[in-house]
Amino acid sequence: MTTEKLLQGVDAFSTWIGKAFAWLIVALMLLVCVEVFKRYILNMPTAWVFDVSNMLYGTLFMMTGAYTLAHDGHVRGDFLYGSMPPRRQAAIDLALYIVFFLPGILALTWAGWIYFGDSLRMHETTFNATPLPIYPFKFFIPLAGAVVLVQGISEIVRCIVCLRTGAWTPRLKDAQEIDVVEQQLASSTYVDEAAKRDAIARSRNIDEMARQRMEQE
């Protein structure tokens, strides 16, 4: 298995995890809509909805972190970074991953596991009229840390490969993201027609090249 295929396999895993937990948005939306109806129309508020909504949002936030990292979606102040050659970018990223990312994520995963264990032993619950168990939610803290750690190690390998080759290893492209870009460009009133056609053609070309590369491997 080539390094590129291994890295894209980790990207695919993180993408699958992120998309699976993204469905919590639907559950959270339905929960809030039902509670608003019950509270303001039926005058029958539910005591546990606030706690459950916090748990759903917290789980969604934590479990989609690896997806964002896999698609290079985290916020970066790239005023200088974006103009640097790939090797210099990789050197900066590698240093930051080693100095800040690894210690932080390892601490989060380890502390989260202890945090979950303590909650499980005491069967911790919420403090309201309808107590709910908290330890299942706290289990997602070390789980999210472990998933982000795997993706982070993949990013470190990507940096090392870039330092050796002078070029970034292509990321696994999300087909839906290409579709969204095309839809936004097609409906934009601030981009002339020639630029629209050129940008859409380039996005489709990138997607096709990635697909062909994966088929060849």
Image (tube, rainbow, N blue to C red):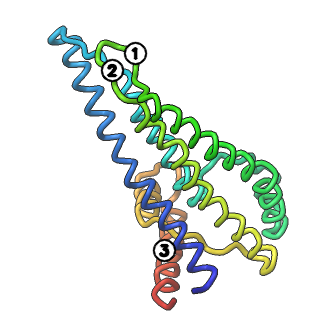
Determine the residue located farthest toward the top in the rendered image.
43
The answer to whether 67 is drawn above or below residue 109 in the figure is below
The part of the image, by quadrant, that contains residue 16 is: bottom left
Say which element carries label 3.
Answer: helix
Q: Amino acid at mark 1?
A: Phe
Location of residue 167 in the rendering, given as x and y in whole percent from the top left corner? 74, 76
Determine the CA span between mark 1 and mark 2. Answer: 6 Å
Q: Secondary structure at mark 1?
A: loop
Q: CA distance from mark 3 to mark 1?
A: 50 Å
The amino acid type found where label 2 is placed reads Pro
Q: Earlier in the sequence, mark 2 or mark 3?
A: 2
Residue pushed farthest front? 121
Residue of label 3: 207
**Residue 127, numbered label:** 1
> From mark 2 to mark 3, how far is it between C-alphas?
49 Å
Is residue 31 placed above or below 149 in the rendered structure?
above
- The percent position of residue 75, horizontal first and vertical second, equals 65, 46
Q: Is residue 196 above or below residue 62?
A: below
Disc number for residue 146: none
Residue drawn at point x = 42 percent, y = 57 percent: 180
Q: Position of residue 216 (x, y in %)?
A: 49, 91
The residue carrying pointer 3 sits among few (fewer than 14), some (14 to 19) or many (20 or more) residues within 10 Å by Cα, namely some
Determine which of the numbered discs, if any, sits on residue 131 in the image.
Answer: 2
Residue at point 75%, 48% (across, down): 103
Amino acid at circle 3: Asp
Residue 17 lies in quadrant: bottom left
Q: Are marks 1 and 2 in contact (CB under 8 Å)?
A: yes
Q: Nearer the viewer, mark 3 or mark 1?
A: 1
First reached walking from the N terminus: tag 3 or tag 1: 1
Q: Quadrant of residue 137?
A: top left
Quadrant in the picture for the N terminus: bottom right
